[in-house]
Image (tube, grey):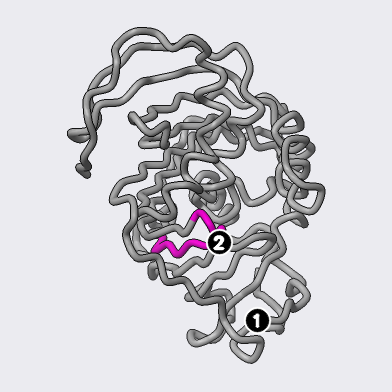
Amino acid sequence: MVRQRRTPSGGTAVALCAAGLMALSACAGDGAAVDSRPPRDPAEAVHRAAAALTEAGSSRATTSMEMATGGTRVTIRGEGVYDFRRALGQLRVLLPRDPAGERQHRPLTELLSPGALYMKNRGAGVPADKWVRIETASLSDGNLVTGGATDPLTAARILRGARGVVFAGSGDLAGVPVRRYRGVADLRRAARTLPAGERGPLLAAAKGFGSSRVPFEVYLDEQGRVRKLRHRFVYDAGRAEPVAVASTLLLYGFGAPAEVRLPAAADIYAGKIAE
């Protein structure tokens, strides 16, 4: 079992989000046909999405995070796998170019785990062979934005706080019949549905965002699993101008191997992170 280390001081608390904000300021699958008739209770279908993913076990994932402020927009993309039963994932994350467009950042490797985010190729003075560890509950956004990708299980758990859910029709997504739903989820309400020890990230985000209410659009397959999920956040974090964030998650290849190993304590960087 990997031992916990204290979060390094300095700039780690903004991690990937800082890279995105710096730039701002300077699959196919299988499945039977889905019944096109409106469900009896759209909210219940959406509330069960996280449980359906846990039942599925694992999947491949593609993420996209668009951040916009002051008329400027950047996009951070990721791709990898996620184990919903262990709440562990691994993503290869591509950062946007520098504001001048002259420098292409090296892809980061991110490990998503309960309570912590691990990053490799972080830069900012961190040795290339070391990981940076960040406690997600200590972040003002609960790591819904900081890592440049919203944790897939956390993204689905946000739906537990959904209200005013509307069935928006059925259709086809990458060859998979799906039902589409829209609504607004409340982060505090979603947090209350979780065990006390798992509420930290969502409660932190509810404080750090401009509002605890998060508009969403989700596509569910016949088994009730998330195929596509889009959240819209407004991130303040003490900034003069809030940042509008659109986080999009695509899940496919359910049952794919998702072997995720957290780094040993000796491989975690404990030094100062450059600003």
Name the residue nearer the viewer: 60 or 47: 47
Is residue 19 among the parts visible in the rendering? no
Picture layout, residue 153 above or below residue 243: below
Residue at 54% in and 47% down: 153
Number of numbered discs on residues: 2
Q: Amino acid at mark 2?
A: Arg
- Left/right of residue 58 with respect to residue 7 in the rendered view: left
Magenta region includes residue 1: no
Image location (x, y in percent) of residue 87: 56, 58
Q: Which residues are magenta?
A: 84-93
Residue 86 is marked as: 2
Picture layout, residue 254 above or below residue 123: above
Sequence order check, earlier mark of 2 and 1: 1
Q: Helix, strand or loop at disc 1? A: loop
Residue at 45% in and 64% down: 90
Characterize the local packing of mark 2: few (<14), some (14-19) or many (20 or more) Cα atoms within 10 angstroms.
some
Which image quarter is the C terminus in?
Answer: bottom right
Image location (x, y in percent) of residue 102: 34, 62
Is residue 32 among the parts visible in the rendering? yes
Q: Which residue is mark 1?
A: 1
